[in-house]
Amino acid sequence: MDNSYVNAVDFFKLKEKNKLASKLMLAAYELRTPENVGALIRLAGNLGIAKVFFIAVENSFKASKIARVAHSSIKHVAFEFCTPEEFLNRIPSDYVLVGVETSQKASNLFTTKLPEKSILLLGNERYGIPQDFLDRCRKTVFIPLLGKTLSMNVSHAAALAAFEWGRQHSGLELM
């Protein structure tokens, strides 16, 4: 068996393209660092996510810092900065807003059926998703943590939730 190294571009050209990923969107509320903004754009590029919304009253991040982390995804991922009101008005009626948050009504991400047309909502790195936005979520899921550190970087939480959605809806195989 040949186990020789193949670069990622060549490797993934050999794999079947995921055609359902465009039914997933991400939204992040009041992120505090441009690096996390860039990481979410890059994640969207990895999974073919339809759009990323950055919900903020004001965007004060330098585009160069976002682009450094987003890498080539900055050129082909649809994303926008919008106010909370603008975001709520842009949610397509056939999409379900799913909060990724530790809250009283949250269910385990890995045992919860995620809707095919989902917008995964993630909160601020310090305060999470505000209650008024949690109240608008039709589903809320938490990521079970087994260690002593009981919080997760927002981009890591987004990656776990998005890959779980992909596993459920697009036949994404974990290699």
Image: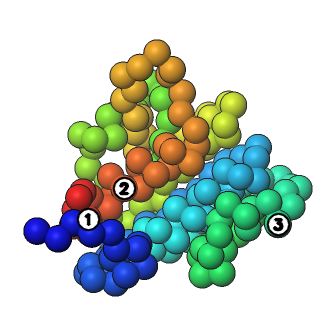
Residue bearing the label numbered 2: 163
Where residue 64 is drawn, which disc sits there? 3
From the viewer's perspective, is 121 left or right of 48? right
Nearest to the observer: residue 3 or residue 88: 3
Q: Quadrant of the C terminus?
A: bottom left
Image coordinates of residue 160 in percent, x first then y, are 41, 47
Image coordinates of residue 117 in percent, x first then y, are 38, 66
Residue extending furthest toward the left = 1
Q: Amino acid at mark 2?
A: Phe
Label 1 and label 3: CA atoms lie apart by 32 Å
Helix, strand or loop at mark 1: loop
Nearest to the observer: residue 163 or residue 11: 11
From the viewer's perspective, is 14 left or right of 143? left
Q: Earlier in the sequence, mark 3 or mark 2?
A: 3
What residue is rendered at 79% in x and 60% in y?
Answer: 65
Assess whether mark 2 and mark 1 are in contact (beta carbons under 8 angstroms). Answer: yes
Image coordinates of residue 70 in percent, x first then y, are 65, 65
Helix, strand or loop at mark 3: helix
Q: Earlier in the sequence, mark 1 or mark 2?
A: 2
Please say whether residue 111 is visible from this viewpoint. yes
From the viewer's perspective, is 174 left or right of 43? left
